[in-house]
Image (cartoon, grey):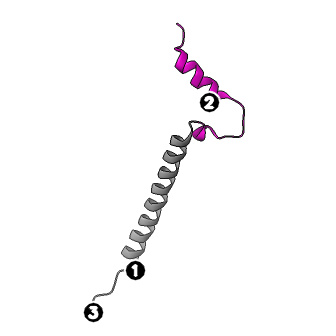
Amino acid sequence: MALPEGLSSKMKVFQAVNDVPVFLKGGPIDKALFGITAGLCGIGLISIVHMIYTMGFAKKKA
């Protein structure tokens, strides 16, 4: 069973030996998706820390 031509060309791009990480070899779309993913993970971590802080140091009722 032969590989389709498009798939074999993509395999050559992703298996090439260079200094580019595999998650960025797809071009600008991969860079944008990676940036969005990293940003959303950062926002999520900050939100969790904020939630834990507000639950742990809740205002005292007088």
At 28% from the left and 88% from the top, the residue drawn is: 61
Q: Residue 28 carries which label?
A: none
- Place of residue 53 in the rendered image (x, y in percent of width and height, measured from the top left): 42, 74
Label 3 to label 1: alpha-carbon separation: 15 Å
Sequence-wise, the earlier of marks 2 and 1 is 2
Part of the protein shown in magenta: 1-25
At 47% from the left and 51% from the top, the residue drawn is: 36
Q: Mark 3 points at which residue?
A: 62
Callout 2 amino acid: Phe
- Place of residue 37 in the rendered image (x, y in percent of width and height, measured from the top left): 48, 50
Name the element at disc 3: loop
Callout 3 amino acid: Ala
Assess whether residue 50 is covered by the magenta stretch: no
| Picture quadrant where residue 43 is located | bottom left
Q: Which mark is residue 57?
A: 1
Q: Mark 2 points at which residue?
A: 14
